[in-house]
Image (cartoon, rainbow, N blue to C red):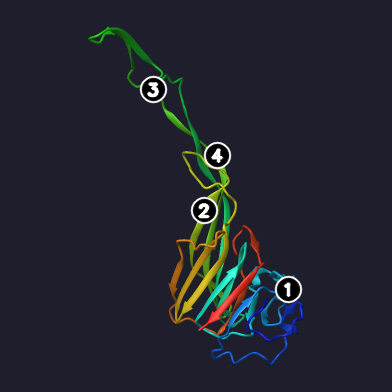
Amino acid sequence: MRIGSSTLNQSKTMSKKNTIKGIIPNNFKNFNPSITEEFEVLNAWDPLSGTWTTNGTTLSTSTSSSSYPLLTSFDLRSQNITANMSLDSAGAGIAFWVQDPGNWWAALPFYTQGSESYTTGTYESDPCTVIGCWAYYCNYAYNGKTFVWTCRCLENTRCTTYYSTGNRTRYNFYLKLLSSVNGTVSDITNILLRSTANATSSFSPATVSSEDNLNGIELTTNENIITIRGRDDSNSFYGSSISYTAVSPNRGYKSGIIFAPGGDYLLSSAVNSISIVGS
């Protein structure tokens, strides 16, 4: 369901070559409706780069993430926005301060996976006894009340404890802030929201899961201050967030959606919904 647009209810694949010209507001003036989009159609969106499609509920692009395809709203021109995006993978994100395909900022999830060594348990190097050594002596002596056996380890015969190890997969789930200036993309900063693995032990504890537990991101810009937060599957915000003050940034007026390299795990351009409020 679209709010804030009077465009025709026609579904089609959108790319720059088939966009109707002459209906975009001046790029250097504020135009601040509130928009909510669940991608039934794409008539109110301008594909600055790449080819974008919808199946009626989910937005996606066939263009490679390495090309940083951009889709911006016809309806909104503002440098100060609050945007919320619902998604279930890495790579797709919120584009803001967009001037053109080579000059923009973006906030997106970024996921990685890799192998790591971890401690699975311990073992003794020698035939260890219950008193902690492999050579000992015992004597039968009176302890003041009765006669008892007392055992002691011989010198230098203490058992040695070794740690056994294995390999497991580590999953890391980040939020990332990117910027492009004249086509040169830079990683500005990132924050780790969640780290899990596919195995655990009492010596190397880990949350056992391969799920990102991230269902959306929120972006707020206030002059040069950028705030990015992630929402978990219960729709609560994570405790960690990105707060960044950009120094003399290139700030355009367009906002929308980008597909960017999002790591090596759960990469997808799919977006379920987005809302953007300009001020």
Q: Are marks 3 and 4 in contact (CB under 8 Å)?
A: no
Image depth: mark 3 or mark 2 in front: 2
Give the mark, 3 or 4, whose residue is nearer the N terminus.
3
Mark 4: amino acid = Gly
Image depth: mark 1 or mark 4 in front: 1
Image depth: mark 1 or mark 3 in front: 1
Q: Which residue is mark 4?
A: 166
Give the mark, 1 or 4, whose residue is nearer the N terminus.
1
Q: Are marks 2 and 1 in contact (CB under 8 Å)?
A: no
SS at badge 4: strand
Q: Which residue is mark 3?
A: 132
Mark 3: amino acid = Gly
With respect to residue 133, does 223 lie above or below? below
Q: Which residue is mark 1?
A: 53
Tell me if mark 4 has few (under 14), some (14-19) or many (20+) residues whose alpha carbon lies within 10 angstroms of its own: few
SS at badge 1: strand
Q: Which mark is residue 180?
A: none
How far, Cα to Cα, is label 1 from label 4?
44 Å
Tell me if mark 3 has few (under 14), some (14-19) or many (20+) residues whose alpha carbon lies within 10 angstroms of its own: some
Outermost residue on the left side: it is: 144
Give the mark, 2 or 4, whose residue is nearer the N terminus.
4
Residue 108 horizontal side relative to residue 130, left or right? right
Mark 2: amino acid = Ser
SS at badge 2: strand
Give the mark, 1 or 3, whose residue is nearer the N terminus.
1
Q: Position of residue 269 (x, y in %)?
A: 66, 67
Q: Residue at x 69, y 74 (%)?
A: 39
Q: Position of residue 266 (x, y in %)?
A: 63, 59
Q: Position of residue 252 (x, y in %)?
A: 54, 84
Q: Which residue is mark 2?
A: 195
